[in-house]
Image (tube, rainbow, N blue to C red):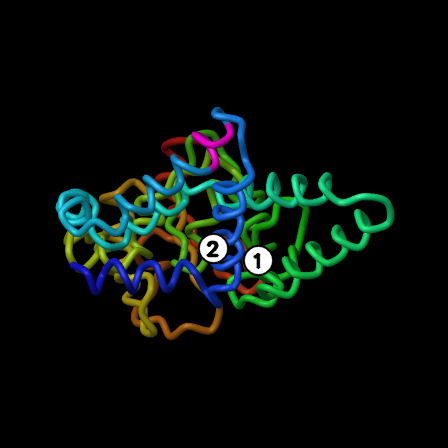
Amino acid sequence: MWDMIRTSFREYAGTGMMTGLFLAAEIFLFVKEKNKTIRILLLYMPVLLLLLYFFPPFAAFIYTFVGDEIYYRLLWLVPVTPVLAYTAVRIWESCGGTKKWLAGAVMAATVMLSGSLVYTSPHFSRAENLYHVPQPVVDICDAISEPGVKAAFPLELVQYVRQYDPAVNMPYGREMLVERWVTEWQLQNELCTLLNVEVLDAAAIAENAREQRCLYVIFREGKTVRGSFEENDFELYQVVDGYMIYRNERFYEDWYG
């Protein structure tokens, strides 16, 4: 349990420089801050949270309910930014004349140099549109827009669909991207599995789509397809941004004809 606590904290702390600044700010508040309310909010409460976080029996209790993937989020309750901001203002106010501006510049530079630019992370990319979702999601959702429509998307798009259009229903969602939910919780969706392999089985996909009442199935253009969608009531509706959109014509006539 102790190894899990340390590993989780190390991953949260990153380079450790912001953690060091936070601890220095707490020491400053302990020595200089006289306001009882501020001391409770920005000194005693964060320290209590950290003590609880590093207390193995408490960690074991929480772990039984949420596991190690969630436990680190307790650190989000520690008000690092308010503590640093308040401390910086106190230091700035204590300086006189031109020293204020020098102190402000030094503190700002210290914060800037204590980490790395967040946008250099591989998890960030330049927005393709005003909705901050991949452009194929926007174009595909616009193409299949129908009242109560249900569509099966490839996994690389599934987490963005309802961010853009909450009216689009799906037989599976973001839960299929969380490894723990799939492996430990045994979350399965056969249509998801069939639609996200290199060789697509048209008959099996069509059968599962009918069972789950999906009007559309969508997959990346260029994938190998075994069998024919057309022989299973699905016709090619559109090709949008490199994605094939097949529609169940029988369902479409029944629902919208």
What amino acid is labelled 1 in the image? Val
Side (left or right) of 18 relative to 67: right
Side (left or right) of 83 relative to 209: right
Residue 180 place in picture, x, y as percent:
23, 57
Q: Residue furthest right?
A: 98
In the rendered view, tell whether residue 183 sits above or below residue 31: below
Q: Are marks 2 and 1 in contact (CB under 8 Å)?
A: yes
What amino acid is labelled 2 in the image? Ile
Alpha carbon distance from label 2 to label 1: 7 Å
Query: Could you classify mark 1 by the number of other residues whose Cα lies within 10 Å: few (under 14), some (14-19), or many (20 or more)?
Result: some
Q: Please state the extent of the stretch shown in magenta in the rendering.
A: 38-42
Side (left or right) of 257 relative to 119: left
Secondary structure category for the residue under label 2: strand
Q: Nearer the viewer, residue 135 or 57?
A: 57
Residue depicted at x 42% and y 51%: 158
Residue 86 place in picture, x, y as percent:
60, 39
Residue depicted at x 49% and y 59%: 20
In the rendered view, tell whether residue 33 sits above or below residue 76: above
Residue 224 place in picture, x, y as percent:
38, 75
- Tag 2 residue: 245
Secondary structure category for the residue under label 1: strand
- Tag 1 residue: 240
Residue 51 place in picture, x, y as percent:
28, 46
User: Which quadrant would the N terminus be assigned to in this image?
Assistant: bottom left
